[in-house]
């Protein structure tokens, strides 16, 4: 948990065990070779692969915005990055102001945020939220009676 790796274009991958969040840069192709009932284009796959050997470089993340509860995972591409934000019971955390759109997904726990009009947004596992670019900063809070982090 808490690790990432980057796979460049034309490198095959498969999920064997565990949980994963896959972020993909803009692409118009997914080429399958097996283990699926969907269309498989083996000839195209064989022609496009890089055939480079070795395992991926594991990225353990870097604390961001001066807060160890915000871990940033930045791949060697400018198209996306991932942040894991942890807010423990009895705490609050202000999300960084971003100049790009962002999507955040609640993986565990529950918490809330209030907007400038006083409307409360309750966050629960499995829910996702879109933040437009230059969105006002949000402060997430977890009630101190909760058993685990958001």
Image: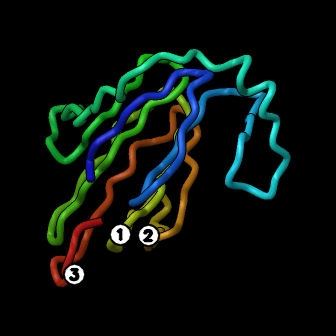
Q: Which residue is mark 1?
A: 108
Within 10 Å of disc 3 (Cα), the crowding (few <14, some 14-19, many 20+) is some
Contact? badges 1 and 2 (CB < 8 Å): no
Q: In this rendering, would 15 be left or right of 132?
A: left
Report the front residue among 120 and 42: 42
Name the quadrant of the C terminus: bottom left
**Disc 3 to disc 2: CB gap under 8 Å:** no
Q: Please give the residue where the numbered disc 3 appears in the rendered image.
A: 146
Color encoding of the figure: rainbow
Q: Farthest residue toward the bottom?
A: 145
- Residue 9: horizontal and vertical position, in percent? 59, 21
Who's the residue at 26% across and 48% down the image?
2
Q: Earlier in the sequence, mark 3 or mark 2?
A: 2
Q: Position of residue 56 (x, y in %)?
A: 36, 28
Q: Which residue bears the numbered disc 2? A: 123
Q: Residue at x 25, y 40 (%)?
A: 71
Residue 110 lies in what quarter of the image? bottom left
Question: Which type of secondary structure does the marked residue at label 3 adopt?
Answer: loop
> Residue at (42%, 20%) from the top-left corner?
53
x, y percent for residue 133: 55, 33
Q: Of all residues shown, which one is farthest toward the right?
A: 39
Query: Of tags 1 and 2, which is closer to the observer?
Result: 1
**In the rendered image of this protein, does residue 9 appear above or below residue 147?**
above
Label at residue 19: none
């Amino acid at each position: 948990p808490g690790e990432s790796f980057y796979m460049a274009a034309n490198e095959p991958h498969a999920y064997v065990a565990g949980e994963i969040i896959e972020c993909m840069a803009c692409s118009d192709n997914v080429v399958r070779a097996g283990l699926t009932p969907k269309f498989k284009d083996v000839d195209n796959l064989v022609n496009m692969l890089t055939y480079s050997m070795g395992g991926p470089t594991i990225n353990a993340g870097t604390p961001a915005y001066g807060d160890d509860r915000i871990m940033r995972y930045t791949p060697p591409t400018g198209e996306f990055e991932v942040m894991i934000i942890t807010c423990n019971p009895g705490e609050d955390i202000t999300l960084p102001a971003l100049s790009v759109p962002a999507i955040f997904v609640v993986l565990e726990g529950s918490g809330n945020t209030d907007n400038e009009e006083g409307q409360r947004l309750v966050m629960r596992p499995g829910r996702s939220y879109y933040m437009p670019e230059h969105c006002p900063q949000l402060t997430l809070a977890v009630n101190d009676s909760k058993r685990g982090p958001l």
